[in-house]
Each structure stands twice: as structure tokens, then as C-alpha cells.
RNA sequence: GGCCCCAUCGUCUAGUUAGGUCUAGGACAUCGGAUUUUCAUUCCGGUAACAGGGGUUCAAAUCCCCUUGGGGUCACCA
């Protein structure tokens, strides 16, 4: 039997990271088995603006390279792929169920049903539907329908049955139907409910494996019963653990971002994200873009390979060694049998580690392209096409080396792009290593003169000059190197000092040195005056 | 609360289906040390777990039962 899997997102305006993991497993299972992966849009709640709501979801799939064989844009033989356009199918299935007696019109007022439910709860009894409408004669029903009396349609649960499934990840799970209320499958306006539409569509699209998060496990008996009532064969089930918040067993949720910000395990990611996003003009404190959304990672400059690798390892492993997997390797190694049962937290640290690895695999040209677009977006360069700019950025990227974990990290090398007078200075370290020491300021002054006259402003000769300078002045490297770095880059640490100097060039180095020296003189004098 | 699911280092996990080779392996994080002018990288090393209690067995992380803990779900949402 051909493998056909589906992912059925609701158009919510963003792609949830946990949903993406579910989609990935579906995609992987289909690809692994040379099957078909279907995208079906669950838009039974009418959406006002479909482009806005669905766009980011399709965008996330495209970014990660998860292609779908049937669905929006590409179409397919089982369309339409929007549930809002499949009403006729649901209506027909509803008629069939009503005619066969598997479903019934329930005229009981919602308030009455609610009251029964509460009464049962109060008495600690299991609540099951009263089925009062089943007492009605055919004529009475006909009259009520003709009179337009509102009624929902419920599936008549066979109370003596049991539902037993053999789940690919959970094994045998069973439910006792005598404990189940009759589920509503269509609203009083005739529109289908999730459980019902899903079953009709899964059958029509011949879905072979329903791979979804564990939170849907409790929907399964209803869906099995619906399939039976409709005379369908049931698909195979695989309820994978949902993605939990870091360090917890709770489902990761968009509404809990504020709490995640305080979570130490999320620390590094938020720091990284905030610093990159603020450069890009996003309001970092706003929740419009958060680590719960796939788009967040793209904006911060993660690679699809890094995200995919992190996602596939949440709740699944190949063996006791394999951590790094390319998309191709996952495709060939993935199996439902090795999906773990317990919920697993997204580990931001590990995500960053995977990301660093995949970044290190990129060619210089690929890194350059990524960085160029980030620099452009932040306004640090004017164009990405200019050959001179490209050559310069290429050198910065090369110099940055493995400090570049995400493309957004290129902003940490902003000293190579800002005007001298706009250079931001690490005030605390500047004070400590430059302003405070009279001797260092003097040495820096002398060094400036030597730098002005060095014949070749290149890393090698610069290194020799600094080395000679320290012996000549009888000082240690530590007395002058950090100070010099602070003056010309504004930072206490960074890439190779001499290559940095070379890249910046004599002019900028001298100007920044002068600028720093006068700043140090000012604060040095002020500091001396107020010292007690 | 009912129903259902889950339980190995801080985290992600291997080991559980076929009990012994597990004084429990790997990765990330962390802590040391080496390399490096700084940072990062790289390399070496360390700390660190079978939730608890009963069984079954020559032998249990693995099988059974109970307890505890965690979570999901209980709509005319998806």
C-alpha cells in the first residue's frame, strides 16, 4: 500500500515550531517510503485574509525545503486542498451517516446538555449523551426540521464497542465506548467540525498514516468510530510526542513567551535573537516574532539544515551515536519505530550547536551571500552587488571565521562597517584598559606614530611592529594589545587583531586611535579629579 | 475530577520488543587543562542519571504490580 501522509495546518498567520516538527516527520515518512506528502488547509473557521494567514506557513515549508506533492499551489488529484471548499463532501458523508442511523439530529438545547454534563460531574458520574432526541418519531423530526428548529448532528457512539488501535509509537491503546459522549460532528448551521472533516478528508485522500502530535490521541477513538460508520478502512496511527518548552514537559506555546524569557535554558537563544533582531529593526520585546515561530529562526539567520537537524532529534534518534544528519540522511534513516514516547523539550543550546556545525559546512561564497543580505537589511552596506563591497565583506566574513554561527552574527563585526565617529565603545573595558592607565595612553600615542609610518599596513608587518614595540618599551602584550583593540574596534575581544587592523586600513586605524586617545584623556583627567 | 499518555545524567538521548557483555554509552551544556596576543575554534580530561516500593528470576534500567510525580485532553475550536 502506498504511503500517503498529510499535514493539515490551520491558517493562523505563523508556523509553530512544534507543528513544523510534526510536518517534518510526516514529510520524512513519505519521502523515506517513496510516498506522497500532502498539505491540506484546515480553514473551516472562515479566514478574512488567506494570504496573510497561510503565507507564513507555506513560506516556512519552502524555507526548510519540505516540498509537498499535493496541496496549495501545486494542486493534485484529490483537491481541493482547502477544507472550506470541500463542503459538498462533508454534506454527502453527513447524509450517509444520518440515513444509516450512525448519526442523529440532536434538538436538545445546548443549555440542557450543559446542565446534564455539570450534574454528572457533580455526582462524579461519567457523562454520556442523553440521546433524548432519539425518542422522537420520524414525523416529529420532520416537523422540527421543517420548522427550522436548530439541531446539531451527533455521531451515535456504539456504547458496547471498544476501540483498539495499534499505534506506531505507543503500541496498543484502547478506549471503552460506554464512557464516551456522542460527539457533535456538524454545527446547527450544518458546517462540519474538525473531527468529522478530518475523517472525511483522510479517507478521500487515502491517507495511509496519520502522524500527529500526542495531543490528538484523545481524538482518535472518535475518528476511528467515524471511519467505521462511514465504512472506511482506518489509517495507521502514529502519535508522536509534542514538543515541550525547554526543560519542561509542557507543550511549547506562543502564549508563554514571557515566561520563557526568564528560563535560563532559553538564555543564549534570546540573547542571540534579541541582538540580531534589534539590528534588523524588530521590536525584540514584542511577541510578534518569537522562538515559537519558524520565521524567527530565519530572521535571526539560522540555516534550514540547523533547524531541521535540531527538530529531527527531538523525540527521534537513529542510534546511540548519530547526531548530525543532513536532510538527505534523515530521509533515508527516519523511521516511526524509533520515535520516543515521552515529550521532549526543544534544547536551544543544542540547536545553536547544530546550527554552528552546519554553518561551518558552508562554502565561503555561501556564507558571503548570507551575510551580505543581513548587512544590507541592517543598513550596514548599501548594496549587495557592488564588487568592491563584496570583496570587502568576504574578507570580514573570512576574518570572523567560526564566530559566525548564524548570519546575524555578522553584526558583531559591525566595527568594519560603521563610520569612525559612530563606533560604539565598550565603556567599561575602555575605562579599565585604556583611560585608567597613564602609561598605556602614552604607549598608545607612541604606537600611533609608528603606525603612521609603517611602510606596509599588513597583518604580518603589523604583528612584527607590535612585537618589537613591546620589547622596546619593556611591556607585556597584554598591556597594549587589548587597549589597541578597544581603541580601533570598540570591543574587548574579537577576531585576530592584526588582520583586523589591516582590513580597517591605516587611515581608519589612525583616526580611531586619535579619537580614542582624546576620549581617554578626557575621562582619565576627570577620573583623576574625582578620585578620593 | 473522568479518560488517555509518559518516567535513564541539567538537557536531547542509547540501552526496554528477544533479562546477563550496563561498575549504564553518546551528544549539548557545565567545570578543569593544553593550544591561541584576546575571543571563538580545536584537542584532552572531569562532574553528572536508571522516580520510589514490592515482586518474578541464578540474574532486572529492561518483565509484572502498586505508589509517587509529570503531561495531554475533556467545545456547535483546530
Image (spheres, coloured by chain):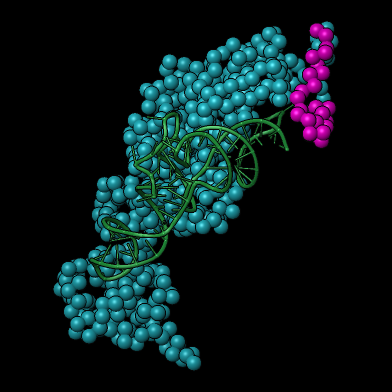
Give the residue displayed 69% in from the left and 8% down from the top: A99
Residue A499 appears in view: yes
**Chain displayed in green:** B
Residue at 68% x, 21% y is: A177
Which chain has been coloured cyan in this picture?
Answer: A
- Quick check: A210 above or below A321? above
Per the rendered image, the range of residues in magenta is A112-138
Q: Position of residue A67 (x, y in %)?
A: 41, 30
Q: Which quadrant holds the N terminus of chain A?
A: top left
Image check: A193 left or right of A146? Answer: left
Residue A437 x, y percent position in the rendering: 36, 85
Asked if residue A376 can be seen in this view, the reply is no
Percent across and percent down for residue A109 are 82, 25
Image: A292 above or below A200: below
Q: Nearer the viewer, residue A375 or A439?
A: A439
Q: Which residue is more in the foreground, A360 or A146?
A: A360
Q: Is A150 a magenta residue? A: no
- Residue found 33% across the figure and 58% down from its top: A403
Q: Please check the rendered image and state whether residue A134 is part of the magenta-colored stretch, yes or no.
A: yes
Q: Is residue A271 left or right of residue A503?
A: right
Q: Residue at horizontal 39%, vertical 35%?
A: A65
How far from the left and from the top, in percent, is residue A244? 53, 44
Amino acid at each position: 500500500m502506498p504511503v500517503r501522509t498529510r499535514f493539515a495546518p490551520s491558517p493562523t498567520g505563523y508556523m509553530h515550531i512544534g507543528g513544523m516538527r510534526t510536518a517534518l516527520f510526516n514529510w520524512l515518512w513519505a519521502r523515506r517510503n517513496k510516498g506522497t506528502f500532502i498539505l491540506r488547509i484546515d480553514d473551516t473557521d472562515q479566514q478574512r485574509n488567506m494570504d496573510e494567514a497561510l503565507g507564513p506557513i507555506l513560506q516556512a515549508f519552502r524555507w526548510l525545503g519540505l516540498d509537498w506533492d499535493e496541496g496549495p499551489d501545486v494542486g493534485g488529484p484529490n483537491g481541493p486542498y482547502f477544507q472550506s471548499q470541500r463542503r459538498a463532501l462533508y454534506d454527502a458523508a453527513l447524509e450517509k451517516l444520518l440515513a444509516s442511523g450512525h448519526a442523529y439530529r440532536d434538538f436538545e438545547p445546548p443549555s440542557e446538555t450543559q446542565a446534564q454534563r455539570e450534574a454528572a460531574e457533580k455526582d462524579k458520574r461519567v457523562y454520556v449523551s442523553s440521546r433524548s432526541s432519539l425518542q422522537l418519531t420520524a414525523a416529529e423530526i420532520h416537523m422540527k426540521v421543517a420548522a427550522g428548529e436548530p439541531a446539531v448532528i451527533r455521531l451515535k457512539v456504539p456504547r458496547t464497542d471498544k476501540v483498539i488501535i495499534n499505534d506506531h509509537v505507543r503500541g496498543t491503546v484502547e478506549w471503552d465506548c460506554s464512557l464516551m459522549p456522542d460527539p457533535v460532528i456538524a454545527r446547527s448551521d450544518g458546517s462540519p467540525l474538525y473531527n468529522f472533516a478530518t475523517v472525511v478528508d483522510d479517507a478521500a485522500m487515502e491517507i495511509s498514516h496519520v502522524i500527529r502530535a500526542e495531543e490528538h490521541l484523545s481524538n482518535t477513538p472518535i475518528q476511528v468510530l467515524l471511519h467505521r460508520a462511514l465504512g472506511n478502512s482506518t489509517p495507521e496511527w502514529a502519535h508522536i510526542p509534542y514538543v515541550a518548552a525547554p526543560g519542561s514537559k509542557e507543550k511549547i506555546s506562543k502564549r508563554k513567551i514571557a515566561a520563557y524569557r526568564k528560563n535560563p535554558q532559553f538564555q543564549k537563544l534570546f540573547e542571540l535573537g534579541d541582538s540580531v533582531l534589534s539590528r534588523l529593526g524588530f521590536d525584540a520585546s514584542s511577541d510578534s516574532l518569537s522562538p515559537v515561530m519558524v520565521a524567527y529562526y530565519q530572521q535571526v539567520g539560522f540555516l534550514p539544515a540547523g533547524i531541521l537537524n535540531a527538530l529531527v532529534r527531538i523525540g527521534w534518534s537513529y542510534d546511540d551515536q548519530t547526531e548530525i544528519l543532513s536532510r538527505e540522511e534523515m530521509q533515508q534513516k527516519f523511521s516511526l519505530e524509533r520515535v520516543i514516547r515521552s515529550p521532549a523539550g526543544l534544547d536551544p543550546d543544542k540547536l545553536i550547536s547544530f546550527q554552528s556545525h552546519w554553518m561551518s559546512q558552508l562554502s565561503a561564497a555561501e556564507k558571503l551571500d548570507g551575510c551580505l543580505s543581513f548587512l544590507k537589511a541592517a543598513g550596514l552596506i548599501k548594496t549587495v552587488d557592488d564588487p568592491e563591497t563584496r570583496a570587502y565583506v568576504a574578507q570580514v566574513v573570512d576574518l570572523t571565521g567560526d564566530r559566525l554561527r548564524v548570519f546575524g552574527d555578522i553584526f558583531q563585526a559591525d566595527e568594519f562597517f560603521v563610520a569612525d565617529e559612530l563606533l560604539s565603545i565598550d565603556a567599561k573595558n575602555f575605562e579599565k584598559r585604556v583611560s585608567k592607565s597613564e602609561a598605556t595612553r602614552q604607549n598608545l600615542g607612541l604606537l600611533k606614530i609608528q603606525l603612521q609610518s609603517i611602510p606596509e599596513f599588513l597583518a604580518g608587518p603589523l604583528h612584527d611592529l607590535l612585537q618589537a614595540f613591546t620589547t622596546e618599551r619593556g611591556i607585556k602584550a597584554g598591556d597594549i594589545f587589548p587597549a589597541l583593540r578597544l581603541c580601533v574596534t570598540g570591543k574587548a575581544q574579537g577576531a585576530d587583531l592584526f588582520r583586523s587592523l589591516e582590513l580597517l586600513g591605516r587611515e581608519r586605524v589612525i583616526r580611531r586611535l586619535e579619537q580614542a586617545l582624546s576620549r581617554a584623556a578626557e575621562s582619565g583627567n576627570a577620573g583623576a579629579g574625582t578620585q578620593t
